[in-house]
Image (cartoon, grey):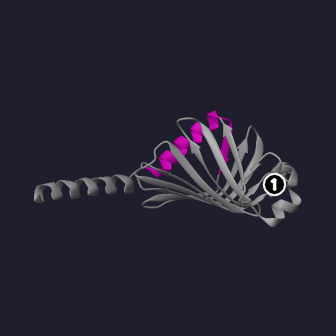
Amino acid sequence: MVRILKYLAYTLFFLMMLVIFLPKTNLYYFALAEANKAGLVISNKSLKESSFGLKIEDVKVFYQGIEAVNIEAVDINLYLFYNRVVLNKSKLSSLVENYLPREIDNVVVSYSIINPLEVTFVAQGRFGLASGSLHLDTRVVEISLKPSKIFMKQYKNSLRYLKKSENGEYSYEKSL
């Protein structure tokens, strides 16, 4: 029994050291190169690496040469079994102004090995509260929206594309 506990302790120690000494900056630049292949260009002012994550400040995302979003701060936390990306204070391009509010307070994207075929997210902003998931096996995106009063008043045209449920929430499903 003592031997099993010793092996378990060594394994956990090894995994923790692996996460701490993982070259997070190199992984970030690899992700940038992969995003560039899809037409996304991401620029930032500062990049700070910590033991379990990466903090990126003043991020600008361009899609096919058009500025899509400005993000004040991005926190990437890598814990091997559970990974999380937090986007703070995002502002969408003025191109979407007629369809939805531009300001997004925060977005939390998470991935866990407990459910490896699903990436979940929660977003909050002037539009209300949105949550959803991306199913990696079926390539389906599901979004549930609890719209704010501002969204209900000023962006009624956008609500036409969403299905309304009996509890007042709106949902959207799209296959990629």
Q: Residue 13: x and y, percent?
A: 27, 57
Residue placed furthest toward the bottom: 149
Judge the density around disc 1: few (<14), some (14-19), many (≥20) Cα neighbours within 10 Å.
some
Residue placed furthest toward the front: 166
User: Is residue 170 located in the magenta-colored stretch of the structure?
Assistant: no
Label 1: which secondary element: loop
Quarter of the image holding residue 122?
bottom right
Image quarter where the C terminus lies is: top right
Compared across the picture, whether 63 is left or right of 82 comes to right
Magenta stretch: give its range.
23-43
Q: Residue 89: x and y, percent?
A: 69, 63
Compared across the picture, whether 28 is left or right of 82 comes to right
User: Is residue 31 located in the magenta-colored stretch of the structure?
Assistant: yes
Residue that badge 1 annotates: 100
The residue lying at 80 percent from left, 58 percent from top is 101
Residue placed furthest toward the left: 2
Q: Please, is residue 103 above or below residue 172 in the view?
A: below
Q: Amino acid at mark 1?
A: Leu
Q: Nearer the viewer, residue 19 or 100?
A: 100
Q: Nearer the viewer, residue 168 or 51?
A: 168
Compared across the picture, whether 138 is left or right of 11 comes to right
Q: Residue 149: x and y, percent?
A: 81, 66
* Dominant secondary-structure state across the stretch colored magenta: helix
Total tally of numbered discs in the picture: 1
The residue lying at 82 percent from left, 60 percent from top is 151
Image quarter where the N terminus lies is: bottom left
